[in-house]
Amino acid sequence: MDLSYDVSLARMREDIDRLAEIGQTARGGADRPSFSAADREVRGWLAEVAARFGFTLRTDGIGNVFIGPPPESRPPGAPVWTGSHLDTVPDGGPFDGILGSVAAIEVLRTIAENQVSLARPVEAVIFADEEGNYHHLLGSRALVEDFSWDRLENFQGRDGDLLTDALEGMGWDPLQATDTAVGGAAVDSFFELHIEQGPVLESQGFDIGIVTSIVGLGAAEVVFLGRQDHAGTTPMHQRIDPMIATGTFLSHLPDIASAVSDEAVITSGLIDVQPGGANIVPRKVTLTVDFRASQDRELELLQEHMIASAKRATSGTEVVADVRVSSMTSPVQMDVALREDLNDLAAARGYRATSIASGAGHDSQNMARLAPTAMIFVPSIGGRSHTPEELSTWDDVEKGSNLLLDAVLRRAR
């Protein structure tokens, strides 16, 4: 295969540096949830880039963005998709999702500049709300299955805002978000470049990780209901305090995970206390819980142990526990043939590659339900991610992006 094409690292650096300024936090990170003011600015940037290079851009009902060649230069057939996301976790880093999105756009630019002849089109896809402010992997999930209106109107963000209101705030009709799924015949294949978000590649000296599988994800709310009272005048033995049950539940999270497997994890990173006063015994405590495992049965066991642990945390009290699982995304395997292609292409470039499983969730696990899917990892310095200190070297960025380009070209030719 002709490997004479290379991405422009200088152009990619300019893009990544520009995006790091949008929604920048005091700590130098980025706070860019989907459908926020910062997200609108990013979408404006995408439109400018598409217009500058003569690409088409369309947005579906839930906010996924598709960028591709103009009709006059578009080959027939189902497209090869490549992309990632541009939303961030609160105070997140400059590479998570951003690398794969910028690299996808750079693949399009490289193809256009070199007038590469293709048998099928290539499109860049920027997924909405990958980080799950409103729902885990929202945009890619909506491509696999339509959300009913009953589900959609109940999705709330971290700040308590409704997804339907956020979509209206973008100037969109929320009803369009119930009609977003595409059939498998609409997509030939999908490739995603991403930072590893862990220490394996760097510590073992690999340039590239070729992902074998992606962990299963569960999301839940654990609610403890008690009785609101005065913090100074209510005796301790007369309180129905949901915060005490919350503390007990949180202290047993490691036990829930270890009861399932050595690799299973469970995390609560967000707690809402109502009514939320220092001098009030709270009425209600709501925890968001993220749980992950590599097998479907392990994911189910995590759910079962979590529910049992919440009930035990209220034992001997009048506090009521309620567990509401909002989503379950099964673990998936990446396409074997595409993985073999990536190994061959990496070797042709002289890159040192290894197989690696992903402990983080990605849009690729939804895309794998639609079409053959592959993921490429590049090393993360110190294994850091979801923090302003998240970093990968520009050399690794270039290697991963060139491998993505090679893989997309092989498939699209």
Image (cartoon, rainbow, N blue to C red):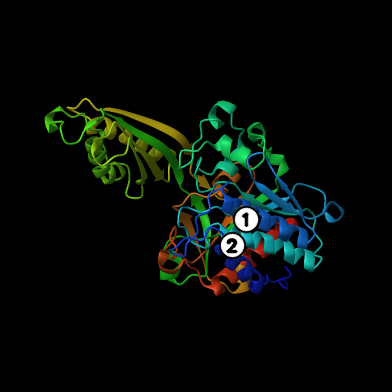
Residue 373 point in image, percent of width and height: 61, 50
* Residue depicted at x 45% and y 34%: 326
- Amino acid on which disc 1 is placed: Val
Tag shown at residue 42: 1
Q: How far apart are marks 1 and 2 (CA)?
A: 7 Å
> Label 2 neighbourhood size at 10 Å, few (<14), some (14-19), many (20+)?
many
In this view of the protein, which residue sits in the foreground, 298 or 90? Answer: 90
Q: Is mark 2 on a helix, strand or loop?
A: helix
* Residue depicted at x 46% and y 47%: 215
Residue 286 is drawn in which quadrant?
Answer: top left
Direction right: furthest residue: 72
* Contact flag, marks 1 and 2 (Cβ < 8 Å): yes
Residue 93 point in image, percent of width and height: 48, 61
- Compared across the picture, whether 20 is left or right of 277 comes to right
* Residue depicted at x 44% and y 60%: 385
- Compared across the picture, whether 346 is left or right of 244 comes to right
Question: Nearer the N terminus, badge 1 or badge 2?
Answer: 2
Quarter of the image containing the C terminus?
bottom right
Label 2 belongs to which residue?
19
- Amino acid on which disc 2 is placed: Leu
Residue 251 is drawn in which quadrant?
Answer: top left
> Can you see residue 118?
yes
In this view of the protein, which residue sits in the foreground, 52 or 326? Answer: 52
